[in-house]
Image: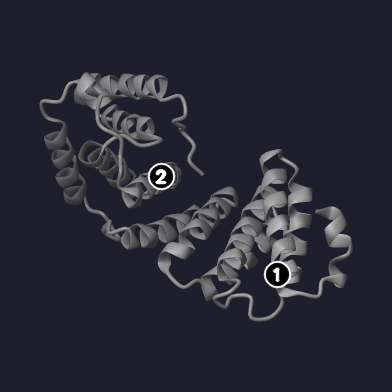
Amino acid sequence: VALLNQGKNLIDTESERYNVISLNLTAAKEAFKRGAFMHSTAYLKHGIELLGRGCWEDKYYEITLSLFEASAEVAAANNDFEKAEASISGVFANAKSKEDKRRSTFTLLRCLGQQGNIGRAVTVGLSMLYDFGEVFPADPTPNDINNELWKTKGVLSGLKDDDILNLPSMSNEKKASCLRLLGYLFPCAYSSQSPHTALFALRTVQIVIEYGQSQGDCLAFAMYGMLLCGSPQEYEQGRRFGDLAIKLCSKNPESSLVWL
């Protein structure tokens, strides 16, 4: 790929141009997997330079979207937040749907979290949750939290640990993405002492019980157990769900406590 990039000025057909762009994207992804972020950045730069004008039109739309998404992720990994947000802005300005903005929104959340801009991260996350069909109050009241707490206890009522451990796999991709997002927003809300903290924890459990197991469901019950342990009367139940989270992690080694 590096040799092809050296001769990129000699490309004289659209098919050749597209193939070289595609090869740069593939090389960038492989370099990123190996932690070679600078090499990944270079491949992406060559790929984007080859796009030319009208790159967001139908013919090049998908590969342009992938290049800009990857560019933002690599820049974030390099702590180059200005470049990451520039690539994210390119996606937001040209994406054809909310779904096409989703990956870049996750990258934006990670950038905001790494920079300590927790308040904006929660605000962006709430907007994204709304797009998933999950509506949270802008300013939760104690009554909002109590209602969700009792709702969560209701869906867990009568369920033994084995029942939860043997839930079917989640097939709803939108809810799986929502669960991933909630798993990221919970520590953000917790560190900023946001009243959304409890609501995020409670909703994660509700989603798992209703839609089934997904990557990171261990975090859902760890969050819930942590919430319960804040009350002396609920300590034993909090410990129970903390232990359950550990069992879920042991059962699903690929499940991770860090989703972004």
Q: Which residue is mark 2?
A: 180
Pointer 2 local density, CA inside 10 Å: few below 14, some 14–19, many at least 20: many
User: Mark 1 or 2, which is nearer the eye?
Assistant: 1
User: Is any part of residue 195 visible from this angle?
Assistant: no
Q: Considering only vertical position in the picture, is 154 above or below 53?
A: above
In the displayed structure, does residue 133 sit left or right of residue 128? left
Picture disc at residue 102: none
Pointer 1 local density, CA inside 10 Å: few below 14, some 14–19, many at least 20: few
Label 1 or label 2, whichever comes before in sequence order:
1
Residue at point 52%, 70% (across, down)? 92
Q: Considering only vertical position in the picture, is 246 above or below 206?
A: above
Amino acid type of the residue tagged 2 in the rendering: Arg
Residue 1: x, y in percent? 80, 54
Secondary structure of the residue carrying numbered label 1 = helix
Q: State the residue in front, 213 or 240.
A: 213
The image quarter containing residue 36 is top right
Residue at point 20%, 41% (across, down)? 210
Secondary structure of the residue carrying numbered label 2 = helix
The image quarter containing residue 229 is top left
Residue 118: x, y in percent? 49, 52
Residue 60: x, y in percent? 60, 71
Could you tell me how far apart the alpha carbons at marks 1 and 2 are, in whole angstroms?
38 Å
Q: State the residue in front, 84 or 17.
A: 17
Q: State the residue in front, 128 or 202.
A: 128
In the displayed structure, does residue 213 sit left or right of residue 48? left
In this rendering, the count of numbered labels is 2
In the displayed structure, does residue 57 sit left or right of residue 181? right
Amino acid type of the residue tagged 1 in the rendering: Ser
Q: Which residue is mark 1?
A: 15
Residue 9: x, y in percent? 86, 71
Residue at point 32%, 58% (across, down)? 132
